[in-house]
Amino acid sequence: MLDWIAPHPVLDSLPINTRKIVLGLRAWAVTARLGRCSLHAAAEPLGSQRAAAHLHLMVGEIRELWPEPFAVSGPCCAGLTHDEAVLAEMLRLGNRRSRLAFDRLLEEMIGAEGRERLFISACVLMQVME
């Protein structure tokens, strides 16, 4: 892998709403592993139950479509996993409604119907965060 050429971004370099979503995802993952209510845990960093519900739906899509288990860092980790970095880019492109670039980002690992579902999820989640 060429991670040493293009290092992953750090959490603090992300736009605020994208950072909140990554933190919400991390809280969701920790509580889901513990068998607790992940929606309430995600709502705190997101600042909204509605955003947490949309994140929950997007996580369901990711879990179904991602070719391998989605890697999530711990809540206090400054760095992003490769998957979190891809998610951040998905959110950026969804926020810009840039469908062609979104498809290019995921076309080698997810089919057209799956990309459509993820694109809609990214657009809606970013809209709810505004």
Image (spheres, grey):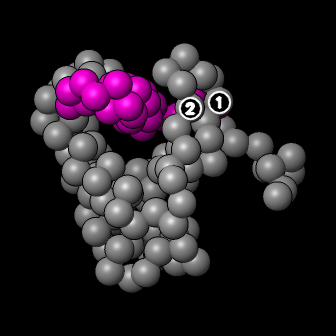
Asked if residue 24 is among those painted magenta in the image, a careful observer would answer yes
Residue type at numbered disc 2 = Ser
Query: Which one is nearer the viewer's eye here, 35 or 111?
Result: 35
Residue at numbered disc 2? 73
User: Which label sits on residue 79?
Assistant: 1
Q: Taking the image as drawn, is residue 3 in sight? A: yes
In the rendered image, which quarter is residue 112 located in?
bottom left
Residue located 47% across and 74% down the image: 110
User: Which label sits on residue 27?
Assistant: none
Quadrant location, the C terminus: top left
Whichever of labels 1 and 2 marks the residue nearer the N terminus, that label is 2
Q: Is residue 105 above or below residue 88?
A: below
Q: Is residue 13 above or below residue 65?
A: above
Label the magenta part by its dominant secondary structure: helix
Secondary structure found at label 1:
loop
Disc 1 and disc 2: Cα gap in Å? 8 Å
Whether residues under marks 1 and 2 lie with C-beta atoms below 8 angstroms apart, the answer is yes
Q: Outermost residue toward the bottom?
A: 112
Q: Position of residue 84 (x, y in %)?
A: 53, 44
Which stretch is magenta? 10-39
Q: Is residue 75 left or right of residue 123?
A: right
